[in-house]
Amino acid sequence: MPEKLLPANAVVVESALRELGANGEIVVLPEKAPTAATAAAQLGCEVGAIANSLIFEADGAPLLVLTSGAHRVDVELVARTAGVQRVRRATPEFVRAATGQPIGGVAPVGHPAPVRTLVDNWLSKHEVVWAAGGHPLTVFPTTFDELVRITGGVPVDVE
């Protein structure tokens, strides 16, 4: 069987997944999925089963919110939950510095240093959850419980 060719960031994520004992394999999508809806259409799943990886700047530090593709993040709720004064969308440069990955492909793992993570409780409604694999063309299947475990994340309501 020929070996799949993965972008460099996806190789890093795949290695992190193996080290963390995660079960999912990186999947290369046929085209970029700039929204949860386009990712869901390519994967044949509900939009709510897409785990959007959103990096925020929380009082100057990175905060990863893994939210269901069916939700919008209430930044005021997230700030209160995280115990910070201010949460705002991070710039592409801030995201790259914190994760080593580009916006549109940020995985929940494989970062240069651990990133504080919140995981949307809504994702627990899906048997299989799809998360980004470190590159805009890559994803991997996982579960809510596995996402919480591999990220050290805290399950929360984000909406």
Image (cartoon, rainbow, N blue to C red):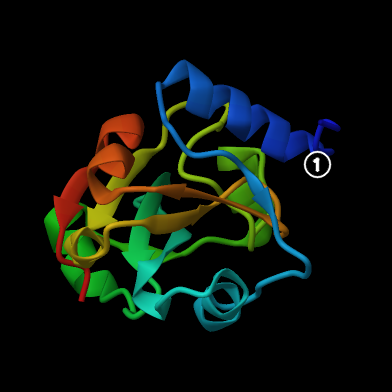
User: Which residue is disc 1 drawn over?
Assistant: 7
| Location of residue 14 with respect to 76 vertically, above or below | above
Tell me residue 53's x, y (percent). Answer: 46, 57
Tell me residue 76's x, y (percent). Answer: 21, 72
Which part of the image, by quadrant, shows the N terminus? top right
Q: Is residue 60 visible?
A: no
Out of 112 and 149, give the one closest to the viewer.
149
Which part of the image, by quadrant, shows the C terminus? bottom left
Out of 82 and 103, give the one closest to the viewer.
103
Q: Is residue 135 visible?
A: yes
Residue placed at 71% from the left, 31% from the top? 11
Left or right of residue 137, residue 69 in this image: left
Residue placed at 51% from the left, 76% from the top? 36
Tell me residue 62's x, y (percent). Answer: 43, 46
Hey, which residue is sitting farthest top in the picture?
19
Q: Residues within 10 Å of mark 1 (few under 14, many from 20)?
A: some
Left or right of residue 119, residue 155 in this image: left
Hey, which residue is sitting farthest front in the picture?
1
| Location of residue 151 with respect to 31 vertically, above or below | above
Tell me residue 115's x, y (percent). Answer: 41, 36
Kindly state the secondary structure of the residue where label 1 is placed.
loop
Number of marks drawn: 1
Residue placed at 55% from the left, 31% from the top? 110
| Location of residue 98 with respect to 55 vertically, above or below | above
Left or right of residue 73, residue 52 in this image: right
- Write down the quadrant of residue 152 in the picture: top left
Task: Check disc 1 and give the amino acid type.
Answer: Pro
